[in-house]
Image (spheres, rainbow, N blue to C red):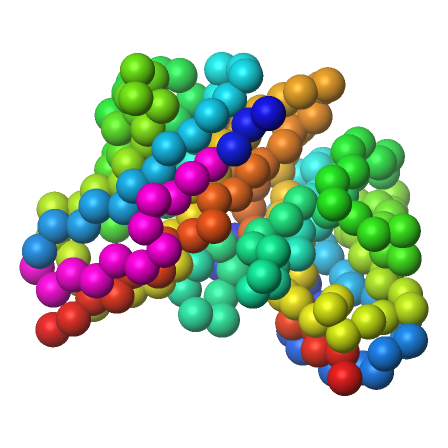
Amino acid sequence: DSGVTQTPKHLITATGQRVTLRCSPRSGDLSVYWYQQSLDQGLQFLIQYYNGEERAKGNILERFSAQQFPDLHSELNLSSLELGDSALYFCASSVVDSPYNEQFFGPGTRLTVL
Amino acid sequence: AQSVTQLDSHVSVSEGTPVLLRCNYSSSYSPSLFWYVQHPNKGLQLLLKYTSAATLVKGINGFEAEFKKSETSFHLTKPSAHMSDAAEYFCVVSENPGGYNKLIFGAGTRLAVHP
């Protein structure tokens, strides 16, 4: 158990809908990262927050957005969903924003868009 | 630009035999390198990391990896495979361009262990 929690575990929805994925980082971790894992694209970095502020953006679509709240939990919002958005979405956290610090991953949310 | 190449998408070994999962990287910076493991329907777990200290890194569950700068490699090994080692393994490079921590994942190697 990494200490990172994600809810829900599974989400099934229809095209065009909007969903929110939630992540609670490990106690004391200030950085939260979101990743998407799909069969065709592999594991891709989406976005990072550090202590409430957006820090870096990766391959995140404009239909997706995220935020980190004062209690450091984070939410990833996916809107106007398409079939291709079906994937496993991971949240990870680390203490600080350093390349020497490993990231701790949550169990993921599996999103299925029908 | 940094990248990670895992040379084998699938590796199959017999229980009790050695494991070798190969990884090559390219990086413009002095990288940190990691191996993560993902068991079916689970999140990713850190096996080991290299951060410019000792070039031979020992990790959990008997795994180790050697950083070879001249070969730009970071291969993962284990002397004797267990059935429980069957999983997907990701080689990861981390850099800090522009002041943020960016992880680049390899495509993964699926390890099968046969009795």
In the displayed structure, would residue B108 be above or below residue B33? below
- The magenta-colored residue range is B4-16
Image coordinates for residue A41, horizontal then vertical, percent: 60, 56
Image-quadrant location for residue B99: top right
State the residue in front, A60 or A67: A60
State the residue in front, B6 or A36: B6
In the displayed structure, would residue A46 be above or below residue B29? below
Image-quadrant location for residue B14: bottom left
Numbered-mark total: 0
User: Which residue is found at the position 43% from the left and 52% from the top?
Assistant: B108
User: Which residue is found at the position 38% from the left and 44% from the top?
Assistant: B6
**What is the quadrant of the C terminus of chain A in the image?**
bottom right
* Residue A101 is at least partly visible in this image: no
Image-quadrant location for residue A55: top right
* Residue A70 is at least partly visible in this image: yes
Q: Could you tell whether A42 is left or right of B54 in the image?
A: right
